[in-house]
Image (cartoon, helix red, strand yellow):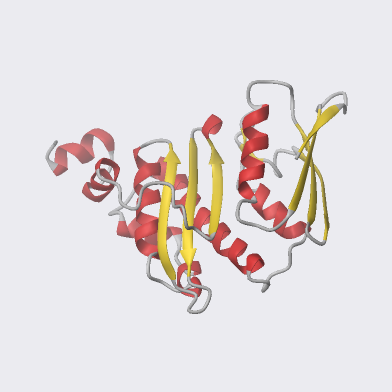
Amino acid sequence: MFAEGVTKMRVGYSKKVLELFLNPKNVGYMEDANVTSLTGSIACGDMLKLYLKINPETEIIEKISFESYGCAANIATSSMITEMAKGKSVKEAWAITFKEEVEELGGLPKIKYHCAVLSVKGLRLALEKWEVIQGRKTLNEDFVLELLRGIMDPHTDKDLVSAGVVKKVDVEGKRVEIVLALPEDEFKEEVLENVEEAFEKMDVELIINSIHPAKGEGSESS
């Protein structure tokens, strides 16, 4: 391995970032997770999926792990956010900020700040889902849009809502209907899968309609 000073000169990463990139902690699928979150997109370069097991009586995050796709900074920030959240209460974990994470990592190149932002966003989405699962937050259009803001549109590098891909969200009880404007290309199925995955661990009837952005004609996926 390069000496710390040489490493910083060559890649701009701190010793801690390189350590977590080469030996990440809390990696992998968690079978007994009771809440998950999905942020980003493989097509856009960085994606993070978090798995949390939260004790419903104590509200403590007993276990947390991640799966990610992306650069060294994405892996390091994903690992760090799990370390920072593990053992904390939901309220304490919600208070973790992107700046605190960057400090714990010993800094990040500014061009990689988005990785820390993505990891904090992923954690907060998981905690917000937990609130809905526990019945403390309402399953409504605003919540659904928040989940969809976690998924990136591969054509614009914006989230699905900001990119105008989401054309309709309708929530009636546990029934959630979403209309997405998606071109018939190699990214369509991935986006649809990501949207379905965003609702994982939730007791909902999810209906996704995809329409062609130009013609307004499409097919249904549920």
In the image, residue 80 above or below residue 61: above
- Residue beneath the point at 81% across and 26% down: 212
x and y percentages locating residue 41 in the rendered image: 55, 37
In the image, residue 133 above or below residue 7: below
- Residue beneath the point at 74% across and 63% down: 139
Q: Nearer the viewer, residue 207 or 160?
A: 207
- Residue beneath the point at 60% across and 55% down: 201
Q: Quadrant of the N terminus?
A: top left
- Residue beneath the point at 48% across and 79% down: 58
x and y percentages locating residue 115 in the rendered image: 44, 46
- Quarter residue 217 falls in: top right
- Quarter residue 12 falls in: top left
Q: Quadrant of the C terminus?
A: top right
- Count all numbered tags in the image, as a single digit: 0
In the image, residue 60 above or below residue 161: below
Q: Nearer the viewer, residue 22 or 2?
A: 22
